[in-house]
C-alpha cells in the first residue's frame, strides 16, 4: 500500500495545482485563455488527499516544494521543451528578454543534471574570459554542482550576485582533457540583441543577432539603416549561438528579406489550427545578396529564419547544423507567481519540413545526443551529413532540403580544430585575459586613442607587440598553464588575435572586439566567398 501511494501521490498532488486553480495563459498573440476544473468529484478527492497529508503525515512537509517537483516530473514525461518556471525564477526568466541584471553573463540549461552554457551573453564577463556555448559548469566556488539535483533557481542563486563580486567555476569543455578553472568577476549584464554591426568591406555588411527579444527588431532596423548608409550591398547575418525567442519578432525580421506573399513559417498542433505567417510588402532588404550563419547553438526562431530563407531560395546558409527545436510553447502564468510553458504546436518551414529533432521519453538522452553530435560536427564537417532525416523536400528552384534534425547548411564548415586546441583553452583560462587586457589598455589608453581615432583603424592597423604576447604567456604559465605542450601555429595565432580583440574591447567595445575575432573566423571567411563570387563580373 505504501509503495502504491509513493507512485501515484505526486501525480495526484500535481493535478491539484494544474487543474484546480485559475490559470492565465500568455500566448504569443497577447490574448488570454483560462482553464477551470471540470470534474467536481476529482476536485474533492484531491483536496481531501492534501488535507489528509497536511493533517496526519508523520513528518512536517513543504507542500509547495512537493508540488513544484511533481509538476517538473510530469512535464518531464512530455517533450524536452515543456517546462515549469518556479515563482522565484520567473522574474529572471522574463528579464532575459528585456532589461539588465548583475551576474556572470551566461544563458544556461540544465542537461543531465549539469549546468550547460547555452550562450555567453555578448559583452559579459564570461564571454570576455573565453567561456563558450556547450561548456559544462561542474563546480562553483569549490562546490560540486553536477549530478546533485540542482534546479534552475539554485543555479541563478549561485551564479548571480552583486557587480564586482567574484565566483570560481570549473568547466568541462569538449576536447579538453582536464577541467578548466575560471574566476569570473560579476558585472552589469546588458541584454541587447544586436551584438555588433559593421562593414566587412566596402560593400558587405555584417549583423550579429544574439536573441529574439522585444527590442530585437528595432535594434536590427537601426543596424540595417546604418549599414545601408555606409554602402551595404551584401549582408552576412550571423545567428550562431542564437537560442531563439519570440516568434513574432522572427516573423518581422524574416519579412525584411522576403517578397510580399512568400511563406515564412506555419504552426500546427493537436488543439491548434494551422496558422500561416507570410511576408508583406514592407521588406527593405528583399533584393540584397544574403548569407546566414548558423551552428549547433542556433535554435527555434533562428531556425525559422534560416529555414524560411533557405526554402525560398533567398539566402546561402553557412556553418554547422542547427540545434533542431521546432516546438511552439505557450506560457501559462499561475496564481502563485510561477509559470508553465507547454508545447502546443510544431513549426514547419515553407516546404513543409519540421525543424524539430526526434525525441523519445528520455529528455536527458535528447540533450546528450545534441551534445555528442555537436562534438562530431566541430571536429569533422563530414559528420554533418550523418543521421540526417531521410525525408527531403524541394525548394522552388529545385534544391533539396532535409527534414528533421534542424537546418542543414548549404555550405558546411567544421570547427577550427587546429586552432582551438587544449593549449589554446588552457592559456586563455589561466591567464586572466580580461584583467590583463584591461591593464594594458588602461596604461596605453591615450596613446592608442591618439594613434587610432576609431575602432576600424585599430582593427586594421594595430599589431600586437611580441613583448605583450610574451608577458601574457608568462602570466598564464605562472598561474598553472602548460604553455609548451600541444602548441600549434594556428593556436598561437588565435591567442594573439584574442589578446588584440580584448584590448580593443576595453576602449572601443564590441566595434573592435568582433571585427578582430572575425579576421580568423573560418565561418566568416567561408561566408564572404559566396558573396564575392556573386559580385564577380
Image (spheres, grey):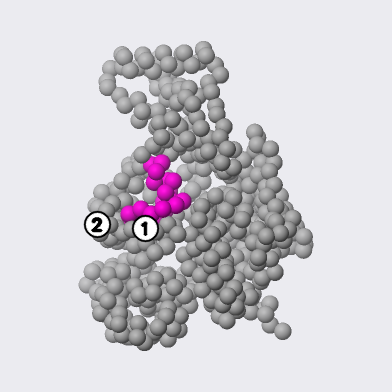
User: Residue 101 lies in magenta, yes or no?
Assistant: yes
Q: Which mark is residue 36?
A: none
Instruction: Relative to 175, say whether 47 is above or below.
Output: above
Tell me the number on the disc at residue 165. 2
Write the start and end of the magenta stretch as one range: 89-110
Q: Position of residue 1 (x, y in %)?
A: 40, 14
Residue found at x 53% / y 38%? 26
Circle 2 or circle 1, nearest the eye: 1
| SS label for mark 1 | strand
Q: For label 1, count other residues whose C-alpha is less than 10 Å away and answer few (under 14), some (14-19) or many (20+).
A: many
What's the residue at 40%, 83% (across, down)?
453
Residue 96 visible, this orientation: yes
Q: Label 2: state its secondary structure.
A: loop
C-alpha span from label 2 to label 1: 14 Å
Q: Residue at x 57, y 68 (%)?
A: 224
Residue bearing the label numbered 1? 189
Q: Position of residue 362 (x, y in %)?
A: 50, 40
Q: How many marks?
A: 2
Q: Position of residue 293 (x, y in %)?
A: 57, 65
Amino acid at each position: 500500500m505504501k509503495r502504491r501511494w509513493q507512485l501515484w501521490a505526486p501525480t495526484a498532488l500535481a493535478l491539484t495545482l494544474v487543474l484546480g486553480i485559475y490559470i492565465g495563459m500568455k500566448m504569443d498573440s497577447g490574448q488570454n485563455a483560462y482553464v477551470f476544473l471540470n470534474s467536481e468529484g476529482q476536485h474533492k478527492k484531491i483536496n481531501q488527499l492534501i488535507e489528509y497529508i497536511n493533517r496526519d503525515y508523520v513528518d512536517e512537509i513543504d507542500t509547495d516544494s512537493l508540488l513544484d517537483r511533481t509538476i517538473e516530473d510530469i512535464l518531464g514525461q512530455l517533450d524536452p521543451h515543456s517546462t515549469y518556471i518556479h515563482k522565484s525564477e520567473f522574474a529572471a526568466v522574463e528579464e532575459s528578454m528585456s532589461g539588465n541584471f548583475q551576474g556572470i553573463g551566461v544563458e544556461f540549461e540544465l542537461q543531465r543534471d549539469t549546468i550547460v552554457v547555452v550562450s555567453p551573453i555578448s559583452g559579459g564577463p564570461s564571454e570576455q574570459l573565453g567561456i563558450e556555448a556547450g561548456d559544462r559548469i561542474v563546480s562553483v566556488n569549490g562546490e560540486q554542482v553536477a549530478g546533485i539535483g540542482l534546479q534552475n533557481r539554485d543555479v541563478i542563486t549561485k551564479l548571480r550576485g552583486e557587480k564586482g563580486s567574484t565566483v570560481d567555476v570549473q568547466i568541462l569543455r569538449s576536447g579538453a582533457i582536464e577541467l578548466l578553472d575560471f574566476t569570473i568577476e560579476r558585472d552589469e549584464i546588458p541584454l541587447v540583441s544586436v551584438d555588433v554591426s559593421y562593414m566587412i568591406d566596402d560593400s558587405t555588411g555584417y549583423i550579429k543577432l544574439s536573441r529574439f527579444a522585444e527590442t530585437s527588431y528595432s535594434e536590427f532596423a537601426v543596424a540595417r539603416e546604418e549599414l545601408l548608409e555606409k554602402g551595404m550591398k551584401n549582408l552576412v547575418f550571423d545567428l550562431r549561438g542564437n537560442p531563439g525567442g519570440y516568434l513574432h519578432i522572427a516573423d518581422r525580421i524574416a519579412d525584411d528579406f522576403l517578397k510580399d506573399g512568400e511563406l515564412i513559417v506555419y504552426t500546427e498542433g493537436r488543439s491548434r489550427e494551422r496558422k500561416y505567417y507570410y511576408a508583406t510588402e514592407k521588406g527593405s532588404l528583399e533584393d540584397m545578396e544574403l548569407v546566414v550563419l548558423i551552428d549547433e547553438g542556433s535554435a527555434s526562431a533562428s531556425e525559422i529564419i534560416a529555414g524560411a530563407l533557405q526554402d525560398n531560395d533567398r539566402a546561402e546558409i553557412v556553418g554547422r547544423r542547427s540545434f533542431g527545436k521546432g516546438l511552439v510553447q505557450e506560457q501559462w502564468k499561475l496564481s502563485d507567481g510561477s509559470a508553465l510553458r507547454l508545447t502546443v504546436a510544431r513549426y514547419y518551414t515553407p516546404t513543409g519540413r519540421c525543424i524539430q529533432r526526434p525525441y523519445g521519453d528520455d529528455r536527458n538522452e535528447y540533450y546528450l545526443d545534441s551534445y555528442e553530435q555537436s562534438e562530431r560536427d566541430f571536429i569533422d564537417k563530414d559528420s554533418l551529413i550523418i543521421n540526417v532525416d531521410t525525408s527531403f523536400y524541394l525548394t522552388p528552384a529545385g534544391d533539396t532540403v532535409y527534414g528533421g534534425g534542424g537546418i542543414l547548411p548549404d555550405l558546411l564548415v567544421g570547427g577550427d580544430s587546429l586552432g582551438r586546441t587544449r593549449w589554446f583553452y588552457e592559456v586563455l583560462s589561466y591567464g586572466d585575459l580580461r584583467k590583463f587586457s584591461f591593464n594594458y589598455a588602461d596604461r596605453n589608453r591615450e596613446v592608442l586613442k591618439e594613434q587610432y581615432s576609431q575602432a576600424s583603424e585599430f582593427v586594421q592597423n594595430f599589431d600586437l607587440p611580441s613583448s605583450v604576447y610574451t608577458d601574457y604567456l608568462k602570466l598564464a604559465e605562472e598561474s598553472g598553464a602548460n604553455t609548451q605542450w600541444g602548441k600549434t601555429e594556428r593556436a598561437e595565432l588565435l591567442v594573439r588575435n584574442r589578446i588584440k580583440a580584448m584590448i580593443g574591447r576595453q576602449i572601443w567595445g564590441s566595434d573592435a572586439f568582433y571585427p578582430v575575432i572575425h579576421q580568423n573566423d573560418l565561418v566568416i571567411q567561408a561566408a564572404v566567398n559566396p558573396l564575392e563570387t556573386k559580385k564577380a563580373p
